[in-house]
Amino acid sequence: MTSITLRVNGKQVTASVEPRLLLVELLRENLHLTGTHVGCDTSQCGACTVFVDGASMKSCTMLAVEADGREVTTIEGIAAKDGTLHPMQAAFKECHGLQCGFCTPGMVISSIDLLKRKKDPSEHEIREWLEGNICRCTGYHGIVKAVQHCAKNGGAGAVGDATKKESTNA
Amino acid sequence: MLEAKMGQPIRRKEDQRFLTGKGQYVDDLKRPNQTYAYILRSQVAHARITGIDISAAEQMPGVVAIFLGKDVEADKIGTLPCGWLVTGKTGPMVEPPHPMLVTDTIRHVGDSILMVVADTKDQAKAAAQACVVDYDMLPVVASIAAARAEGAPNVWEQAPGNLCYDWEIGDRAATDAGFAKAHKIVTIEITNNRLVPNAMEPRAAIGEYDSGTGDYTLWTTSQNPHLIRLLMAAFTLHVPEHKLRVVAPDVGGGFGSKIFHYAEEVLVTWAAQKVGRPVKWTCERFESFVTDAHGRDHVSTGRVALSKEGDFLAMDFDTHANMGAYLQLFAPSVATYLYAPLLGGVYKTPAIHVNVKAYFTHTTPVDAYRGAGRPEATYLLERLVEKAAREMNMDSIEIRRRNMITTDMFPYQTPLAFQYDTGNFQATLDMALEAIDYKGFEARRKEALGRGKLRGLGFSTYVEACGIAPSAVAGSLGARAGLFEQATVRVNPTGSVTLFTGTHSHGQGHETTFAQIVADQFGIPMENIEHSHGDTAKTAFGMGSYGSRSLPVGGSAIIKATAKVIEKGKKIAAHMLEADVADIEFKDGNFTVKGTDKAKAFGEIAFAAYVPHNYPLLTLEPGLEEQAYYDPLNFTFPGGTHIVEVEIDPETGVVKVVDVAVADDVGTIVNPMIVDGQIQGGLAQGIGQALLEEAAYDEDGQLLTASFMNYTMPRAGDFPFFKVGNHATPCTHNPLGVKGVGECGAIGVPPAVINSVLDALWSLGVRDMSMPASPQKVWRAIQEAKAKGTSADAE
Ligand code: FES
Ligand code: FES
């Protein structure tokens, strides 16, 4: 067992983990952050996408110990603390970018990351960027529309308001 | 007065929880002191088990129990039932047993051998892998061709030649007479590729047993929890329904694959009682590739007899369908009743005959997958019609128009049992042609050619059958269940409403659509309506969501229940307003005495029903909750036109879908945003089938495409935005006039894609293309055509 300390959605977390534990397992099983989903076992689907130090990352491709000392934001930490949806979440709702909701957390995070890197991506760039996120429900129509909508209406902005320092032990 | 909600693109109520990570899917649930199950799956397709040694595994850390097929048998657990008995020309289908865990013979890769229950998931998996299974390999039939081959080994002794049934529909003599008169006969041979549904949420199940009450609970990824409870009570677990609760919470997509009753549902529930702790099982993606029921897998021949002018005189079809190793819940009906009657399509062909032979193979069972039979029919028919146009030297649109059922012909009795109630196929064709800018196509083709690219335009029309089904009709055709739907409308004392339905939403947005219906019926705001579904402890009964039935059948039950509430409300209002019931009208949320301003609001009536101080107690019970069952009078028949434009790079064979325009008639629309979303999602799956997806087996029965690394799931970059148009002719036999929309995207579009690919390659001499039209196949076809030196002019 290895002891790790990281920040998850603005809170400091200390956990004792097996070296083989995946970040997605730490989030889901130990921290009960079940918004991060597992859709495959080959790192293809993107349902597990989270932010690690501000960059989107498939949390099934990373060991929990690798997240030691880093800042992780999951879908639960994307909206403001008062519950106001992040502009990308609001855009997904507005443009019907989700149906069953299973791919949605990964899609939202990946899309926010795109707009952080590129303010006004073309339709082609959006579609290429989302290559690592599979959705079986929407045909991507509403998802791409949502990213465009968000870009047009002021962009993605910051996620959550993860400034407060709190700590929990997992 | 509240604005009407019907027809409005209201944003979804359910989105909030999904967008914030608060959805509750089965794998998100944790029961106190739960254990984890891992099921050992066969890695070979056909073998006789000679021994299973679990002694080492039993000693491994964390192992709670290991269960074998014989343990299941010893407890008299039943085998998985088939829900539809197809009777063929020579008698009923062969219906082999489908055990939870095999005891002696393995029949496909993924067949379940044993289940380990342990304290953690890793421990369960490690122990399962430490179990030693000895077996003798047996010969394999992994395809329809192999199953039909002379001297092929039998998957089941009781099914010689691997034949499950040999079934026909239609008038053979009339069809032969049509062919006898033919000016020209056009024939096509087609394979409909096998697909893996791949809902993004893998299947999962948690079983729990309360030794204090003797109650069992199962949480499962299901489209129809009541049906699962019924099957478990009657056929598999043998725990009566009042002691068994089945919950399907948020479910991450189904597309048919989560209709069926799977062994894991029984195993975890049964094992929970055995080990005295909850048992949780979550499918790994590899497992879902080999254990979720697959879709399609037909090999067919179609023929059309044409007059000199291009009229369809008769058609006949000969289909071989792959059932896989076992009969999954609805599989026999998918290749017969849900398939063959749709081969009439939008056309007035007077005589049609269809023969279907179903075969067992050593592959994962096949069952309903988005469209279930109708995509197979549409693909065969529309490829045939296109070929007929080419061979008759007729325009693709003209041949379709010429043979289309016209609006004055409804209700239209097809020669294949169905009676279409309404439709306007010409209107959808015109609409789609307009949307794709048909007139501008030749200019676009030329422009592309200038860049060295080949453009094609492909058409497809379709009719499908939804809203399954009139129970009596389904019963006479072999269905072993009723197919009505139930809804309960509970008006709470303060006038808010809780709606309980037997249908289940796993992406379709029922919580919004159904609330729109109830809001309009009662004249109350959407926020005052809560929709509860997916829990047998809450909803009385229901057959679930599949076959695009939730709105046509389930929605009709909701309307019936709300009408009962209003009827009772009128009686309460009449008493309170001291008027005659006949004089009370209900409008915009108020019960009013006709011609006066005396009125009681909906909320006041609700309150009076629960606080009956001034209430007709002698003639009316208190409370305001009504239940309704609705059994449909007929199927519903959505239809439409799908047009696809592709551009092919002849150097690489890559097919790029540049435009998709569809016009569908799904009847009255409650929420156009949700309807369009359903069509867009279906289109993606249909285009995926046509260009990308295939469950490919080798001769040994190994699934070569058993992960997202080699089964090509459609990605965002594979599509343009879809142009989705609607042309509604309301259904004539249900109260909302709705027809169902869940599947039409996947039904109409595959032949449009392939017809488009062939259109692009026609001038090079390419005459056939199978799905998926992968770059390699397209490139090869181009090279072969070039080598042959054929060209369109030469024919
Ligand atoms: S779970 Fe599929 S990519 Fe991580
Ligand atoms: S919304 Fe269901 S997988 Fe994307």
Image (spheres, coloured by chain):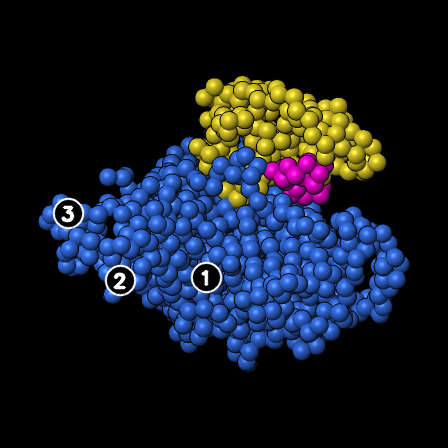
Q: In the orientation shown, which residue stands out farthest toward the front?
A: B613
Q: Residue at x 29, y 46 (%)?
A: B603
Label 2 vs label 3: CA separation? 22 Å
Residue A63, visible in the rendered structure: yes
Q: Residue at x 44, y 75 (%)?
A: B476
Crowd tier of the residue under label 3, counting other residues whose Cα lies within 10 Å: few below 14, some 14–19, many 20 or above: some
Magenta part of the chain: A26-43
Tell me, for residue B540, which label it has, or none.
1
The answer to if A40 sits in the magenta stretch is: yes
Q: What colour is chain B?
A: blue
Where disc 3 sits, the SS reads loop
Give the residue type that dot 3 points to.
Lys
On the image, numbered disc 2 is attached to which residue?
B617
Using the rendered image, report if marks 2 and 3 lie on a common chain: yes
Label 2 vs label 1: CA separation? 27 Å
Using the rendered image, report if marks 2 and 1 lie on a common chain: yes
Give the residue type that dot 2 points to.
Leu
Front one among B426 and A88: A88
Where disc 2 sits, the SS reads loop
Residue A100 is situated, as x and y percent measured from the top left of the image, at 53, 44
The mark lying in front, picked from 2 and 3, is 2
On the image, numbered disc 3 is attached to which residue?
B598
Q: Residue at x 49, y 36 (%)?
A: B16
Dot 2 and dot 3 residues touching (CB under 8 Å): no
Left or right: residue B759 versus residue B706 is: left
Label 3 vs label 1: CA separation? 37 Å
Give the overall secondary structure of the magenta segment.
loop
Q: Give the position of the C terminus of chain A as an image quadrant.
A: top right
Front one among A113 and B222: B222
Q: Residue at x 41, y 61 (%)?
A: B486
